[in-house]
Amino acid sequence: MQSHIRIDGRVFAYVFPCAWEDYAKIGFSRDPLGRISALHRRWFEFFDLDAGTLVEAESERDARDLELQLRSPFKAHRAPAPMTVQDKAGGRTEWVRGANQALSLAVDALGAQGYRCFQLKAWLQAAQRLREALGLNVQVTPVAAGSLPRFEMKARRFVVDRSS
């Protein structure tokens, strides 16, 4: 995994494993933070951020190809999106079950081929810190002004928690 995190102007293939089961979402995005938060309102608990990875691509076409390269060997593992994933987020066909360990090895192989791979949690924290430093809206779920539910406060603490 890469230690120097690059955020702006990049496009990534991603693997977002679920925290509760051997289940994962494979896809690509220019904004992995926006993408993961669109998939589930409690993304910071729903996904295993320590096990998730991003693979930096040279172009959107390259990212699409990487997604297909990661997904293709797991046709037998295809699964429906979990019922708690927000329908409006789309991406209902890129889920696999029972393939997390093999996906991790596939990402490692991409790293060995020269692709820059990032640990998901570290990248998301860097992205949130950058957005906060730039004064951008760092809320990852819509909330009414003046009311932060407990899980929203936990999402905000995610950016501060750099030690775990």
Image (tube, grey):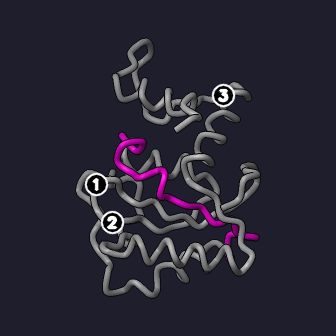
**Residue that label 2 marks:** 23
**Residue type, mark 3 in image:** Glu
Which badge, 3 or 2, comes first in the chain's sequence? 2
Q: Residue at x 37, y 47 (%)?
A: 40
**Residue type, mark 1 in image:** Trp
Report the disc number at residue 20.
Answer: 1
Front label number (3 vs 2) = 2
Residue 27 at x, y percent in the picture = 51, 67
State yes or no: discs 2 and 1 in contact (Cβ < 8 Å). Answer: yes
Report the disc number at residue 132.
Answer: 3
Q: Is residue 100 above or below residue 1?
A: below
Q: How crowded is the residue under tag 3: few (<14 C-alpha within 10 Å), some, or many (20+)? A: some
Residue 57 at x, y percent in the picture = 70, 69
Q: 129 left or right of 42?
A: right
Front label number (1 vs 3) = 1
Give the magenta range.
Answer: 42-61
Residue 85 at x, y percent in the picture = 31, 53
- Would residue 67 be counted in the magenta stretch? no
Q: 145 left or right of 117?
A: left
The residue lying furthest to the front in this view is: 163
- Would residue 52 be counted in the magenta stretch? yes
